[in-house]
Amino acid sequence: METKTGRILIFGGSFDPPHKMHIKALTDAAKLVRPDLILAVPSWQSPFKYGHWASYEQRESLLKKAFSDFKFRSILRISRFEAERKRKTYTWQLIRYLKNKHPEHEFFFLMGSDLIASFKKWKRPDYILANCRIVIAPRENFRAGKDKRFISLKKVYPDFSSSSAREKILSGDFSLLPPAVKREIISKDIYFSKTAMRISKVMSEERFSHTLAVCSLACALAERHGADSKKALLAALLHDCAKEWPLEKQIRKASLLFKDRDFRALAGKAPGVIHQYAGAAEAFFNFSVKDKEVLSAISGHSCGKKNPSKLSKILETADFASPDRKHPLSEKIRKKAFSSLENAFLDMRKAKKEYLRKKGLEILPYE
């Protein structure tokens, strides 16, 4: 039975997915704080992110798996506070709710040292500091500093995050995750893990490496510019799935979905663009992708659309400017894309046209 007074340790985050350092940092914080209750609070919609790769229900389920062997699991509870609100929630609102529910308790809030720099930009940081103690988990490459308002754990934790865990999942590396989380992700194909495994088996190592680079950039741009990061991931993952096929196979596959197009005539002008249509057809027929926006992005990532959606702009830009690209404009456009997707997109298309002009190749009109 819960006591009327005591200590409550709060650990909030997207947990997309929960990884080993979440568990390690919370274990060490619990040893230091010695709480009577630990609350893990998955975000419904993080104030600092445009979307999550996994749904709330999936992340909550993964969180339960992650803490199945947690040393302090007897006092751990997963709070559905944000899920019940079903809207963006700020930390001060969570603390206010908990203080009203547990008025006699002392509160502690665990966060990584990478968040210290942005803490002043949080909503009502003074309220947070006045009503709970901040416990800092120092991360490599992020100095915790010496601030008497914060309690710092003595250990320094490896600098990896849920985003780096997601990227590793695509390459089949689950080393950052607890075994139970890995099993759940694979069995339910969260983060398109099975799709990535299938893709890796039908591509050359070099092509798959490029695909992962495009996935990483496309998702980062989607989060930066308010697009759906899951759609960006799926489109990037499948955009080159037909790239290495023989041209005849590309034509046959593309014709199944785009029946009104003369791909043999197009192949005589620009054989290098057929793979985008074949890739969309492969995504539709063999990967069960029915989302029209995703299919449109895949089918236009090479020669482009006339009036592209934000997702199409992101994929076309990410494909052109992915970190593995060697051409001199790649890095410049990649950096510009984070500040202005539109300007980067226009520069990218201008560079494409100039490249084709110098090669003496036909410049196709955008669809």
Image (spheres, grey):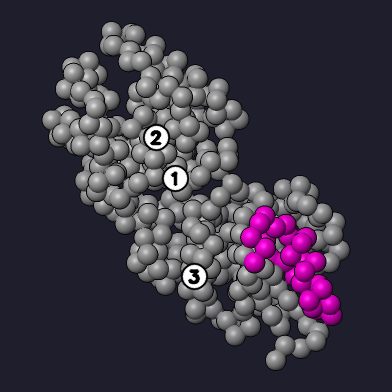
Q: Which residue is mark 3?
A: 61
Amino acid type of the residue tagged 3 in the rendering = Ser
Q: Secondary structure at mark 2?
A: helix
Q: Which circle's residue, 2 or 1, is located before the other in the chain?
A: 1
Q: CA distance from mark 3 to mark 2?
A: 31 Å
Image quadrant in which you'd find residue 184: bottom left
Seen at 33% across and 42% down, the residue is 238
Is residue 86 in the magenta section? yes
Q: What amino acid does circle 1 point to?
A: Lys
> Of residues 24 and 192, which is closer to you in this image?
192
Residue shown at 78% from the left, 56% from the top: 146
Range of magenta residues: 84-111
Disc 1 crowd rating (10 Å Cα; few below 14, some 14-19, many 20+) is many
Quick check: 148 above or below 343? Answer: below
Q: Can residue 297 be seen from the camera position used here? A: yes
Q: Position of residue 364 (x, y in %)?
A: 32, 15
Q: Give SS at disc 1.
A: helix
**Tag shown at residue 297:** 2
| Residue 124 spot, x, y in % from top left | 82, 54
Q: Is residue 126 left or right of residue 348?
A: right
State if disc 1 and disc 2 touch (CB < 8 Å): yes
Which of the numbered marks, if any, corresponds to residue 231?
1
Front-most of 261 and 273? 261
Is tag 1's residue or tag 3's residue first in the polypeptide sequence? 3
Q: Secondary structure at mark 3?
A: helix
Pick whichever of labels 3 and 2 is earlier in the sequence: 3
- Nearer to us in this view, 177 or 113: 177
Placement of the N terminus among the 4 image quadrants: bottom right
The residue at 29%/44% (across/down) is 284
How many numbered marks are there?
Answer: 3
* Mark 2 to mark 1 CA distance (whole Å): 10 Å
